[in-house]
Image: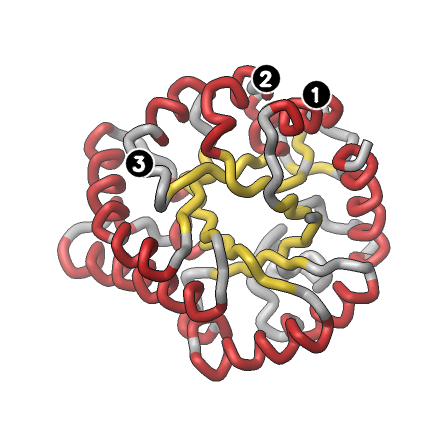
Amino acid sequence: MIGFMQGRLSPPIDGKIQAFPSEKWREEFPLGESCGFQLMEWTLDHQNLWENPLMTPEGRQEIRVLSARYGIRIESATADNFMQAPFFKRKGPECEERLSDLKELIEAAGHLGLKYIVIPVLDEGRMESPREREKLREGLNRLRPDLLSAQVKFVFESDLPPQELAEWIATYEADAFGVNYDIGNSAGSGFDSSKEFEAFGHRILNVHIKDRELHGTTVPLGEGNANFDKVFQGLKKIGYQGNFILQTARAIDGDHLSALRRYRDFATSYIEG
């Protein structure tokens, strides 16, 4: 099923391509319904994390009401808060506090019936040494019982080369951890999708649809380095049957509704083609 990333139907916040739309999040349910969507991926930021409705009982109840009213499910969330404040780059109480945030997020996601939490191991959250890799693995494995109990999985979004990512994800149990495949990020890094799917395709649980220039920024679908024919043929070949989330470029003219409709139609032509 094709869904959209929360915030793509709202004006950008502080010029960011992605941020939780704190003032407009309720409006995205009827707007999404008007576009024919039945799926949205939630977003969380480290700043004001505990004000995000996903993280409070009252907020989750309001999400349930809006989901039922407008027919839009929430099955995944992107934890940008992890990338913005990675626990494995901190020591002592601060490290434990950030791990506790993830534990609370797992519990909240379980209460709302989410399947996946996207963990971006990118930018500030990128692993920069063997020690950081090990500290990340140790910390997340401590949360594995919570993931299993909540029936939620962490899906990693990474810019590691295909074989390196395959070897890395193999150190995490498949019952609680998988891969979020981002078409744009892979294209921007110049990776060959056929080699990626051969290496770790069996661990892909969620897909982000976007386009990027080679070693550059996010651009409208079809204007970057992504080979969508090859990618979608490859996903069909490995039997991928999960969700597709539009994490696309923002509308320059501010008409976010029309832009998302165009992107939805673009993606549908490949998924159903």
Circle 1 crowding by C-alpha within 10 Å: few under 14, some 14–19, many from 20: some
Q: How far apart are labels 3 and 1 at the CA level?
A: 28 Å
Looking at the picture, tell me which residue is in the foreground, 116 or 157: 116
Query: Disc 1 or 2, which lies upstream in sequence?
Result: 2
Amino acid type at image mark 2: Ser
- CA distance for labels 3 and 2: 23 Å
Q: Position of residue 258 (x, y in %)?
A: 85, 55
Q: Is residue 212 placed above or below 11 in the rendered structure?
A: above
- Residue at the extreme bottom: 58
The answer to the question of whether label 3 and label 1 lie on touching residues, with beta carbons closer than 8 A, is: no
Q: Which residue is mark 2?
A: 194
Residue at position x 68%, y 52% from top? 3
- As helix, strand or loop, the secondary structure at mark 3 comes to loop
Q: Which residue is mark 1?
A: 230
Residue at 24 percent across and 62 percent down: it is 97
Q: At 32% from the left edge and 60% from the top edge, which residue is drawn?
A: 149
Toward the viewer: 218 or 221?
221
Report the amino acid beneath label 3. Answer: Tyr
Task: Mark yes or no: residue 199 visible.
Answer: yes
Q: Residue at x 53, y 80 (%)?
A: 61
Q: What is the x, y in percent for residue 150?
A: 37, 61
Quarter occupied by residue 49: bottom left
Q: Residue flagged by tag 1: what amino acid is it? A: Lys
If you read the primary sequence from the N terminus, does the residue marked by circle 3 or circle 2 appear first? 3
Give SS at disc 2: helix
Distance between mark 1 and mark 2 Cα atoms:
8 Å
Mark 1 touches mark 2? (CB < 8 Å): yes
Q: Decide which of 117, 25 is in the foreground and name it.
A: 117
Residue 172's disc number: 3
